[in-house]
Image: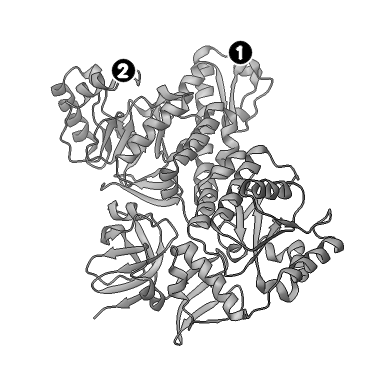
């Protein structure tokens, strides 16, 4: 817990926050190493190394002297005895664990892998700069330290930040960096850009038009003395770093940092390795990822297959989704336009099915999501992703989608399976059919939207259908039950939509009523259900999405200090049920469950309905 740090915007593990010091500073924040000799201008001060100070007594005196000079509302990183990562833990921790300083102001603490953290406002990853080009060791240390500290504390990785890796560091959850590497680069005649670095003697012109670069040309820089040239490069390199930070913050606000990182990581192989390995740390990344975002999910790289939103959707389809009670499965290709049913191709499929459509279960095969049941085509990210359409599928795509379809058909059985597909889609279906030892009927005659193919689809489905009653109202309930199960867990659909429920309004703005009381509404922008108080009361016992609050009547929103307990299943943007002795509420989570339970600052839940308990 901290008195001095508050998160204001989140994009997965990345966040924009504020260190509430005498002069508040916004994070992600760059420590200016050029001010190190002027304490009055610094918001974050490193009290120094014990290697230099010599003794704990000298360190305590130094810390007291700095604190008396700058006051309590400047963050001081306590004197530390840092070691490079190559030093054995038993050696480093024996020395480090002996250190303990009392300080009433905002403090920072240097942490090493295996070290138990003390209460602090900022934690420093010891020797972070030594991990450059070693993605696996960097992540192992980073995730170990992050898992042992509370969410509402800032995290600093010193000596590693460059314009090319800043976005990746912020994406992983770093809040504070420094510009020391840009200064070192300048004194080595290295000209930095957001997409890499250049030695000065390799440049024919300056590729930047910042104020520094606009005032001088490459020939003039080369004629300068070493100190003057370094000064020019320091100013340019820092300008690039600051500009990159501004762009990264805008990406966080827009919820598109992942898309930027997937392109930016190509500047260095170790950054690509960082992204790929971080996706394997699914539990860490998933607990921070929101259930939906306002923008499109752009899936342009092979890493898109392993990003949290894709994997979570695919797993929930397999774990939570229950298909309708029909015997015929129809496998269809995806479309560029979303939702699929609004596309020209899917409109033709629907026309071909005609009145028999009610007896068929439609599942769309797609990359990167794997499979999308028709009932979930509105649910994020099924209606919110975009990919480069080339007609070519790489081996990883085919393997991923094949596995999703295989696992689905292993779990759910149908008397007949029809595939109206061509090309790679058909290869995937044939592979799954062979592995499972099942038969699939193929109805496309070379082009899925040709008249011959559509009539073949119609005739095949007519021949397979067995006539029975399936009303349009029952089909609407199946759709809403599927969304409820996906959102709140298997079984939620049956609770929110019992047989006596009624669905009103037109698709996609369905409203659910029970005994003339509205219990839920389908929000078409994200394909999710918004509950009323009546709906929340129905799900109260079943749901994992419960937030328990203290004895107060909330108004508008619930701050984290008011949360007594929150289910760890809760993710940002989840629909949650809020329960307290004086109020019963429904709202949208702005933090994950663990974060809202542990944090001492920030809005935990944005409320929509509040019921006072007498």
* Colour treatment of the image: one colour
State the separation of the CA atoms marked 1 and 2. Answer: 43 Å
Compare residues 529 and 133 and report the one nearer the observer: 529
Q: Which mark is residue 410?
A: none
- Label 2 neighbour load within 10 Å: few <14, some 14-19, many 20+: few
Q: Residue at x 64, y 25 (%)?
A: 206
Q: Residue at x 30, y 28 (%)?
A: 112
Q: Is residue 396 left or right of 463 when viewed as pictured?
A: left
Residue receiving disc 1? 223
In x, y percent, where is residue 492? 44, 68
* Residue at the front extreme, as displayed: 437
**Residue 442 position (above or below residue 238):** below
In x, y percent, where is residue 540? 34, 70
In x, y percent, where is residue 589? 40, 61
- Determine if residue 540 is in view: yes
Compare residues 374 and 203 and report the one nearer the observer: 374
Q: Residue at x 32, y 32 (%)?
A: 124
Compare residues 476 and 239 and report the one nearer the observer: 476
* Residue at the bottom extreme, as displayed: 516
Residue receiving disc 2? 87
- Quarter where residue 583 is shown: bottom left
Compare residues 402 and 594 and report the one nearer the observer: 402
In x, y percent, where is residue 214? 62, 30
* Residue at the left extreme, as displayed: 57
Is label 2 in a helix, a strand or a loop?
loop
- Quarter where residue 68 is shown: top left
Is label 1 in a helix, a strand or a loop?
helix
**Residue 130 position (above or below residue 543):** above
1 vs 2, front mark:
2
């Amino acid at each position: 817990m901290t008195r001095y740090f508050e998160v204001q915007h989140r994009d997965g593990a990345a966040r924009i926050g504020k260190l509430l010091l005498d002069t508040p500073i916004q994070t992600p924040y760059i420590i200016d190493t050029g001010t190190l000799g002027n304490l009055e201008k610094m918001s974050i001060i490193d009290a120094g190394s014990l290697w230099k100070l010599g003794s704990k007594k000298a360190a305590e005196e130094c810390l007291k002297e700095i604190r008396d000079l700058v006051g309590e509302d400047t963050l001081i990183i306590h004197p530390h005895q840092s070691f490079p990562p190559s030093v054995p833990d038993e050696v480093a921790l024996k020395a480090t664990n002996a250190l303990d300083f009392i300080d009433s102001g905002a403090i920072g603490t240097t942490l090493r892998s295996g070290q138990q953290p003390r209460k602090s406002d900022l934690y420093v990853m010891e020797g972070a700069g030594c991990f450059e080009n070693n993605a696996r060791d960097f992540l192992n240390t980073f995730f170990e330290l992050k898992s042992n500290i509370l969410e509402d504390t800032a995290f600093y990785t010193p000596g590693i930040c460059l314009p090319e890796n800043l976005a990746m560091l912020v994406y992983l959850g770093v809040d504070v960096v420094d510009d020391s590497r840009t200064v070192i680069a300048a004194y080595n005649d290295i000209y930095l850009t957001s997409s890499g670095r250049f030695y000065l003697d390799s440049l024919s012109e300056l590729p930047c038009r910042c104020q520094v670069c606009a005032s001088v040309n490459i020939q003039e820089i080369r004629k300068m003395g070493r100190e003057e040239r370094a000064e020019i490069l320091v100013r340019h390199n820092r300008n690039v770093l600051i500009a990159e930070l501004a762009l990264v913050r805008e990406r966080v606000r827009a919820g598109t940092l992942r898309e930027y990182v997937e392109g930016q990581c190509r500047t260095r192989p170790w950054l690509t390795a960082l992204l790929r390995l971080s996706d394997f740390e699914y539990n860490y990344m998933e607990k921070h990822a929101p259930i939906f975002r306002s923008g499109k999910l752009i899936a342009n790289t092979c890493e898109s297959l392993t990003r949290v939103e894709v994997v979570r959707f695919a797993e929930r389809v397999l774990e939570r989704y229950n298909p309708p009670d029909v015997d015929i499965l129809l496998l269809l290709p995806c479309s560029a336009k979303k939702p699929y049913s609004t596309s020209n191709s899917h409109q033709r499929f629907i026309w071909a099915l005609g009145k028999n459509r009610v007896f068929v279960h439609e599942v769309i095969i797609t990359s990167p999501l794997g499979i999308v049941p028709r009932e979930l085509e509105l649910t994020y990210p099924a209606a919110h992703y975009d990919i480069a359409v080339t007609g070519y599928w790489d081996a990883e795509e085919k393997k991923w989608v094949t596995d999703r379809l295989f696992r689905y058909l292993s779990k759910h059985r149908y008397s007949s399976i029809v595939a109206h597909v061509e090309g790679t889609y058909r290869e995937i279906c044939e592979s799954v059919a062979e592995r499972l030892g099942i038969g699939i009927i193929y109805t496309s005659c070379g082009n899925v939207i040709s008249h011959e193919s559509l009539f073949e689809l119609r005739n095949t489905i007519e021949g397979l259908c067995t006539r029975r009653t399936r009303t349009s109202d029952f089909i609407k309930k199946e759709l809403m039950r599927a969304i409820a199960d996906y959102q709140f867990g298997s079984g939620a659909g049956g609770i929110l939509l019992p047989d006596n429920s009624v669905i009103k309004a037109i698709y996609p703005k369905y409203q659910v009523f029970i005994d003339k009381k509205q219990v839920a509404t389908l929000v078409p922008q994200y394909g999710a259900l918004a509950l009323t108080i009546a709906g929340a009361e129905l799900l109260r016992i079943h749901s994992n999405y419960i937030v328990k609050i203290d004895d107060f009547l909330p108004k508008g929103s619930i701050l984290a200090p008011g949360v007594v307990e929150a289910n760890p299943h809760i993710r940002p943007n989840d629909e949650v049920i809020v329960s307290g002795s004086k109020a019963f509420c429904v709202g949208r989570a702005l933090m994950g469950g663990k974060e809202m339970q542990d944090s001492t600052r920030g809005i935990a839940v944005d409320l929509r309905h509040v019921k006072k308990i007498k």
